Amino acid sequence: MGTATDPAAAETPVDLAEPGFWQRPADERAAAFAALRSLPGPVFFGERTPKGPGRGFHALVRHADVVEAARTPAVFLSGPGVTTPEPARWVRMLFGDSMVNLDDPRHAQLRRIVSRAFTPRLIARAEDDIRQVAARLVDRVEHERPEDFVTSVAAELPFQVICNMMGIPEEPRRAILDQVNHASEHTGVARPLRRRLRVPGRGLMALARMQGMVAELGRERRRRPTDDLISALVTADVDGRRLTGRELGAFFSLLLVAGVETTRNALAHGLHLLTANPEQRALLLGDLDRHLGGTVDEIIRHATPIIQFRRTLAVDHRLGGPDGTLLRAGEKVVLFFGSANRDETVFADPDAFDISRGSNPHLGFGGGGPHYCLGAYLARQEMKALYRELFTRLPGIRSVGEPELIPSNFDNRVRSLRFTF
Ligand code: HEM
């Protein structure tokens, strides 16, 4: 049960730290977050670890609070780790640090290197590729008539696009995709404890194999550069630095987990939202050019593929100004992007799926600041390309029944979604 850090705030009957909360129906969770947003300040939730009481966190559930934390990186650190549980020290030593878990100056230095791989020139080239991958997937849907949208379409598109950008040869791709699925399985909260405890071991082995393979590709490209992303990363010289083999492996893993899972879930939620809201679907199909951009952003707002990231206070800080809630150095906050995206002070009728919102300052790609999603533009291009291809060639496409969701406090994951056209 939560206790408000602001003494005026009432006790709240929900416990965001309890795995059971994340298995409740979506509307119950949304109502709980709406109640939390209406309190005068953030609520503190105590946590338990397998070894005993954990440190707990202040839940940032309002749009303004999430933005403040994301855009004040000198106070709200990413360094100790932004996920739950935090990556163990030995894991970070063995696999290298992922940039999401770094602060300046290391974060800025790494981000400058990898941003060079996301230049308009490389992204423009990726756009042709995205269109071709999307067209091939729709060909396959027409011929093979698969039942599950997630495995046949939504997961394939972002995965093939990233592999093409990185220059990963065809042959190991299937094994890598299986490994990605293993490596990220532990984020679910629904499976029995015994299974949850076993998964990270399997996932780490998968990660180790994948990173070893990518590091080897990096060494090869350093000797004989081509015009792919791996070559750009291992030969780019920014501030006298380029990526080491280990950093390259860590970055590729981040791209796979951050770029594939998220886009796949957004694509699947999107098809279902457009099926469940026929008037919005009619609006979109009536003028694809006009509404595609707004549709993609509304899907990301409504579905919020990444539910939460953490930060740790570097110093004491009053949230929201001099009269705000006092957060102490060393304490944790959790940025609940999904709750910020339903903040009624920012979005009119926030639970409605409305592709024609004039302005849509959602926080689905983060609250701004130095960690803002590196792939936001790429993800939008992928989603627009796929929906354009699908709705132009298969205008009758729609989901069937409800999506099968994997309860998680980290990502809004869809395991499967049946569809027809
Ligand atoms: C719909 C799809 C996507 C969503 C919803 C999403 C969401 C996010 C969010 C919420 C963050 C954290 C922002 C913060 O802490 O302030 C993030 C970071 C990141 N994302 Fe994405 N993402 C998506 C697609 C992608 C793609 C396609 C890529 C790359 C191919 C990508 C690469 C990254 C990277 C590298 C970071 C870490 C940036 C840093 O720490 O500096 N993402 N993303």
Image (cartoon, grey):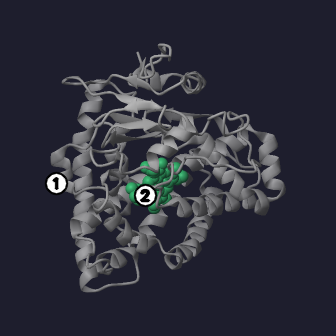
Real-space CA distance between mark 1 and mark 2, rounded to the nearest whole angstrom = 25 Å
Q: Measuring 54% from the left and 38% from the top, which residue is drawn there?
A: 338
Note whether 31 is above or below 371 in the view shown: above
Q: Measuring 32% from the left and 33% from the top, which residue is drawn there?
A: 328
Note whether 98 is above or below 350 in the view shown: below
Which is more N-terminal, label 2 or label 1? 1
Residue 92 in the image, given as x and y percentages of width and height: 21, 51
Residue 29 in the image, given as x and y percentages of width and height: 54, 25
Q: Measuring 43% from the left and 58% from the top, which residue is drawn there?
A: 370
**Rendering quarter of residue 163:** bottom left
- Image quarter hosting the N terminus: top left
Residue 414 at least partly seen: no
Q: Do the residues labelled 1 and 2 touch (CB within 8 Å)?
A: no
Does the closest atom of ligand 1 sit within 8 Å of the Cβ of label 2?
yes
Of residues 119 and 272, the one drawn nearer to the viewer in this rendering: 119
Does the closest atom of ligand 1 sit within 8 Å of the Cβ of label 1?
no
Of residues 56 and 378, the one drawn nearer to the viewer in this rendering: 56
User: Residue farthest to the right?
Assistant: 286
Of residues 307 and 166, the one drawn nearer to the viewer in this rendering: 307
Q: Measuring 30% from the left and 45% from the top, which residue is drawn there?
A: 81
**Rendering quarter of residue 348:** top right
Residue, disc 1: 94
The residue under label 2 is which amino acid type?
A: Pro
Residue 107 at least partly seen: yes
Residue 389 in the image, given as x and y percentages of width and height: 68, 62
User: Residue farthest to the front?
Assistant: 322
The residue under label 1 is which amino acid type?
A: Leu
Residue 63 in the image, given as x and y percentages of width and height: 56, 39
Q: What element carries label 1?
A: helix
Residue, disc 2: 370
Question: Label 2 neighbourhood size at 10 Å, few (<14), some (14-19), many (20+)?
Answer: some
